[in-house]
Image (spheres, rainbow, N blue to C red):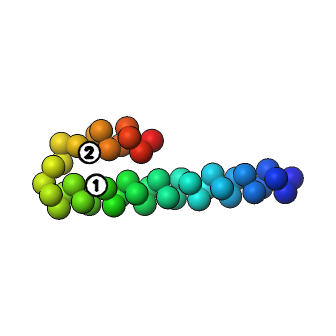
Amino acid sequence: MVNGHHHIVICRILIIINLYCYFVIMHALDSIGKSQYHYSGILFVF
């Protein structure tokens, strides 16, 4: 049970990191003005 719970925690952390990186990349692209890369960014992260 301990290993299973630890695995779930790691998965949650990875998901949070992916979401954080996604929003950072989207914000950077918006600042540059390349909004056409949003969909490719979604596919890249997930």
Relative to the observer, which residue lies in front, 25 or 8? 25
Q: Quadrant of residue 32?
A: bottom left
- Circle 2 crowding by C-alpha within 10 Å: few under 14, some 14–19, many from 20: some
In the image, taking residue 10 as reference, residue 46 lies left or right, namely: left
- Write the residue at 24% across / 60% down: 28
Compared to residue 32, the image places residue 42 above or below, namely above
Please report contact status of discs 1 and 2: CB closer than 8 Å, yes or no.
yes
Count residues near mark 1 (Cα–Cα under 10 Å), then give few for <14, some for 14-19, many for 20+. some
Asked if residue 9 is positioned above or below residue 45 in the image, the reply reads below
The type of residue carrying mark 1 is Met
The secondary element bearing badge 2 is classed as helix
Q: Going from the N terminus, do you reach mark 1 or mark 2 first? A: 1
- Residue designated by label 2: 38
Q: Position of residue 30 (x, y in %)?
A: 19, 57
- Which image quadrant is residue 2 in? bottom right
Left or right: 18 as drawn, with respect to 3: left
